[in-house]
Amino acid sequence: MHAPKPATPIPGVKYKRIILKLSGEVLRGGKSGDPIDAPTLERTCAQVKEIHELGVEICVVIGGGNIFRGLNGEKRGVDRTTGDYMGMLATVINGLALMDCLEKMGVTTRVQSAIPMNQIAEPFILRRAMRHLEKNRVVIFVAGTGNPYFSTDTTAALRASEMHADILMKATKVDGIYDKDPKKYPDAVKYEEITFIDALKQRLNVMDSTAFSLCLDNNVPILVFDLNDEHAIRRAVLGDKVGTLVRN
């Protein structure tokens, strides 16, 4: 299936259709410690609104680690499959929070869930998601892939491939990819750009292996950047050097 022609963005926009991967942890408050911190949520949504106004077509994949993470549940005796489903439900909570905040900012939004829950979200239907983008709506994908043992990184890579996205933007708490942990090693070197093959050879922790392989096989570049850097997403879609770009 060919991707539909996107809405015309303003001149200078480098990426016309993006998948924005947000971990649940980015919504957690610093001082408040709340799973969903209101000022943090508003700042995040303001960045999404900023690029939406440039005419960029945006899909968001949200994690649930601020509420429940399946792997952590396993350490506490929760069955892995059960824990993963609990984590998927956590992403639904985060997705609804994003939707509510974006709608209050005047951005029309739709939530699509990989697990049917018709009273609160649409089911994930590829053609419907494409149509939402054509109508200038932000689409938020929740509930992961709908399957245990798959991370939301994998969901983001899968949706980026399905939606023919120009790039997968992974928002983190660091400003890119380093040759070693910059928190432990002051001499760590940041990469502005690196190939998929070099990232594999150096065993750099960009995404989990399934997600990384999907992006490699489908030629979807990955941009790793710091969401706390104000206007980072806007600068990235306008072609400025932000974070680290992984590409073929």
Image: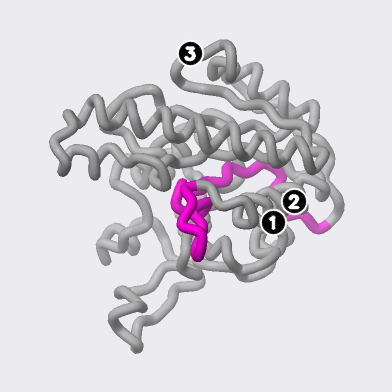
Circle on res. 116? 3
Q: Is residue 83 above or below residue 35?
A: above
Q: Amino acid at mark 1?
A: Val
Report crowding for label 3: few under 14, some 14 to 19, many 20 or more residues within 10 A (C-alpha). some
Circle on res. 51? 2
Mark 1 vs mark 3, CA separation in Å = 33 Å
Of badges 1 and 3, the one in the foreground is: 3
Q: Is residue 37 left or right of residue 213?
A: right
User: Image point 51% across, 59% down: which residue?
Assistant: 32
1 and 3 marks in contact (CB < 8 Å): no
User: Image point 67% across, 24% down: which residue?
Assistant: 130
Q: Is residue 222 visible?
A: no
N-term-proximal mark, 2 vs 1: 2
N-term-proximal mark, 3 vs 2: 2
Mark 3 vs mark 2, CA separation in Å = 29 Å
Q: Is residue 80 left or right of residue 58?
A: left
Q: Is residue 57 left or right of residue 246?
A: right
Of badges 2 and 1, the one in the foreground is: 2
Q: Amino acid at mark 3?
A: Pro
Q: Amino acid at mark 2?
A: Ile
Q: Identify the secondary structure beneath mark 3.
A: loop
Task: State which region is magenta.
Answer: 12-35
User: Image point 58% across, 18% down: which residue?
Assistant: 120
Question: Residue 37's spot in the image, x, y percent?
Answer: 56, 52
Question: Residue 35's spot in the image, x, y percent?
Answer: 47, 48
* Residue situated in front as seen by the camera: 32 or 74: 32
* Residue situated in front as seen by the camera: 211 or 148: 148
Q: Is residue 4 left or right of residue 172?
A: right
Q: Quadrant of residue 72?
A: top left
User: Image point 59% across, 32% down: which residue?
Assistant: 96
The residue to which callout 1 is attached is: 237
2 and 1 marks in contact (CB < 8 Å): yes
